[in-house]
Image (cartoon, rainbow, N blue to C red):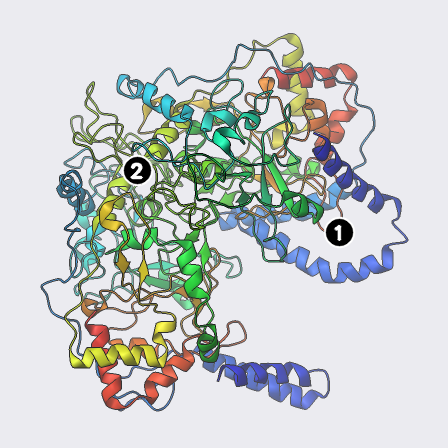
Amino acid sequence: MSIDDTTKTKGNDMSLQNNMHPVQGQSSRWKRARIILPIAILLAICTAATAYFPKSAKVVRKANSGASALRQNVALPASVTATDPGPRPLPADAGGFLKSLSANEQQIEPSITTEFNRVHDVVVTSPTDGGLGPRFNSNSCSSCHAYPAAGGSSPPNNPLFSVYNYNGASNTMPFFETSTGPILEGRFINQPGTTIPDGTVHQLFTITGRSDATGCNISQPDFSTAASQNNLVLRQVSPTYGDGLIEVVRNSDIVTNMNANLPKKASLGITGHPNYSGNDGSIMRFGWKAQVRSTLLMSANQMNVEMGVTNDVFPNEIDQTPGCVINPVPETVTNFTPGILTEFFPGDYSRTEYYIQWLTPPTPATSTSSTKNGKTQFTNAGCVYCHTTSFKTPATSRPALGNATINLYSDLLVHHMGPGLADGLPQGQAGPDEFRTAPLWGIGQRLWFMHDGRTNNIVTAIEDHYSLSNTTYPASEANQAVTNFNNLSSKNQQDLVNFLRSL
Amino acid sequence: MYKSDDSQVQNNSGTNSRRRVPYLVALALLLVGSLAALMSRPAVVHGSGGSCPVLPCPTATDPGPRPLPAAAGNFYSTLTTNQNSITTRLTQIFTEVNFVAGGPLVKTVGLGPRFNSNSCSSCHAYPAVGGSSPPNNPLFAIYQLEGATNSMPYFVSATGPVKVARFPYKSDLVTPDGGVHQMFTISNRTDAPGCTTMVQPDFTTAEADNNIIFRQTTPTYGAGLVELIQESAIIANMNSNLTTKASLGITGHPNYSDDDGTITRFGWKAQNKSLVYFSGEAYTVEEGVSDEAFPSENDESIPSCLPPFPVPPGTNKTKGVPDDRNDTGEAPKLPVNFPGDLERFALFMRFLAPPVPVPPTQSTTNGLTQFINVGCVMCHTQSFTTPAASIPSLSNQTANLYSDLLVHDMGAGDADNVSQGNATGDQFRTAPLWGIGQRYFFMHDGRETNIVNAIEDHYNLGNGVYPNSEANQVIQNFNNLSSGNQQDLVNFLRSL
């Protein structure tokens, strides 16, 4: 909590300075601008042009130049009177599988649930068990994807405190984890001590000292040094409810929505673009920077990145120090026992894939006159131009996922969010200051907000969307919308917040 | 060579600020030089005589591909009984022909709307299923199947390699593209009722704009071993023999996965992490069969060309995306098709043993020595050992793949202007050489059928955009070999 506040303040300080000394800095700034401007223009063109269809790319480019100019001049009114009613209490309005799954799909619900909840130890004792480490963030999917029900995000009490020393592990707790804070993972912008881009997750813990990992002796990453060098990026856990619906939304629908309401978006300073998969050219949509394409790739990637469990998609251990590669690879294996054509045939990653693919979206609270007006204000202020109310899924081969209207409140695009939120880490076509519009479904019961979980107050989270430009990054695309929110009457502000907490 | 070229460029920019005339002359020289370098794609050399990129021209001749029977394509003899019990089914899936809808089996639907072929094994064909391009291009039997109204792109020839087209840039010729543009569409196929208006890409205009590049089919034998080679082994090998490598101008670096930060290793630019990943991608990119890794149709612009198609009741339909998925079964408690095709493709390739080289002769034994002496081996690393693996056939095996699994600058003549991950527009993965003894086409775009030409094609000068090929000194060394040693080296390659 405390470190997150510091980070945020820093970002705002920088913006403030830019604002307060416009003349002093001018000549040196002009010099810099002469270098930076052409690069920035090129970048802007490239960014805009990454749009899949050449026609739409042109439209966006036009909107972009007008929009970013507009964003610079937005001044934020100070008065915010709304208060966060806090997360809706349990029972969970999320979790559980889609009701419309077929009988045959339903018959494997128990085994996929077991898989998602499985606690992995180091030694592989069956085709499904074990495989933890050598480096890991946690030992079970459900330890972090926990709240308000399995599949969700960080619970009120940080579960890592019961994981890090488990079974004799000699880990110390990194400084940024707190017992009542969000679960955070660390990424390094550059490889430690170099200017070579890194960007990967550096797992919090190692299996060193665990009784089931004798002979392994590796140390945890040096997070303190990384933080002191501004090389540490933190990301919190994303919920997975409804992911099976998100992954089948058509690319063309995402692009159509991107190109809708362009005058309005331009007037608000909103652009945004997809993060495209280099593999098949489709739009990626999971993760804080929309850097993952599908539930299959997400679950396989997370198996190795978060738990160190190698699998058929990511079969190489992340750290191969002798003595620390305890099991044959990959560790979660295709099960070749006779009668193989069962749900146990594929590796664990397929079962976790189905788990997150089949979870039903969160159910919003019954609407009230306040939340109804709040939704209107959400539209009026302009929130809705990134937090797109809904998409419709196409016909699908798994009928439970098809032809459904999904109220995710996201355009599945990435947007410039200003220096205050920028984490310095590009992923695919998402720049260092760009983030995916976080889907808002389920935030009524969410405990932490923003990519790094910096706040537990939803009003603060709204304000965190506001950030003026600095010499490195353009202003946040949300500046005008946040300004509009702040300009709302007290009642309308509160209704909007109540609406969010109803989701 | 490498050095003098660099300094030439530097000199040019140095004179730039002083006087105008030398500057213009230098600029003109640079331009001419760059153009020459751009066009320095080695001329066709047929053994002795002819031109070649660097003198003396080689005298060796290509004995040609070893004839069938195939020395590749078998599954590991060490598979367990349980693994063996599914190989027949895996082969069926790898060789299945996909229809748009209404195919003979529930698993054989989902082709298109855009595609390069309708089956894995049509392209991964030679010298046995799982390999690369056969001598006769299979696409001619496919492109107008079921009434499709495709025309054959200009670059596909009946006896040429199967290759896919990518456009380096979008139609503005500025914005990077790099994606595969499938040759064919399902328009007017009888199994795609209603889809009539999807047109093929305009390859001719792309060619006129110099905006088209090609990639041929890579073989998959032994890929299960390649997948498991440890990062630490790849890095250790990269950092070995640094003095020799430096003297040859060889560097190279891995291409990394954005997902888990590990080294990617499949594909012409080592852009692909694993066989599951590769299968999932190829299924939707090459055949248009969307799957659970990549669940989008590859063109969503024409609704009547998207599933579900109105096929007669009782025939097999695509219900929607993804076209192929793990199937929990149509009847209660019969999850017969649970693993999707992409997992089965991956298993098929994982179970394929590496090609078997011919027994060494005096000539090929000396050829290996020359291969090492001239420096080929500094990129085409002879072997890696796999770690302990959960599939016993893949465990602690020596894989004689002749690749360092790194990407290297290959100069302007090979550059295709497509960057993928950490591989830039002129960088390519060191192609594994196992199995090239029976290979028909060489280089990423299948430009050569003659293995001597393929060697020479590694020699490329840089231009204003790309540095020299890292292979230049090695090719110079090869050309400097005696005729006998050259021929032995070539014979060695054809023994693999």
Using residue B209 as the reference point, say whether residue B332 is left or right of it.
left
Who is closer to the viewer here, B399 or B108? B399
Q: Which of marks 2 and 1 precedes in the sequence? A: 2
Query: Mark 1: few, some, or many residues within 10 Å (few <14, many ≥20)?
Result: few
- Please report contact status of discs 1 and 2: CB closer than 8 Å, yes or no: no
Position above or below: A465 against B364: above
Determine which residue is flagged by label 2.
Answer: A333
Q: Position of residue B38 (x, y in %)?
A: 45, 77
Residue B295 percent across, percent down from the top left: 37, 37
Depth order, front residue of B349/A170:
A170
Looking at the picture, how far across and down is residue B140, in whole percent?
A: 19, 58
On the same chain, marks 1 and 2? The answer is: yes
For the residue labelled by badge 1, is the local secondary structure a helix, a strand or a loop?
loop
Q: Residue at x 35, y 42 (%)?
A: A327
**Quarter of the figure with the C terminus of chain A:** top right
Task: Name the disc covering residue A471, or none.
Answer: 1
Amino acid type, residue under disc 1 in the picture: Thr
Q: Dot 2: few (<14), some (14–19), or many (≥20) neighbours within 10 Å?
A: many
Q: Chain of mark 2?
A: A
C-alpha gap between disc 1 and disc 2: 49 Å
Q: Nearer the viewer, residue A83 or A367?
A: A83
Identify which amino acid the numbered label 2 is placed on.
Val
Residue A3 appears in view: yes
Q: Secondary structure at mark 2?
A: loop
Figure quadrant of the N terminus of chain A: top right
What number of labels is visible?
2
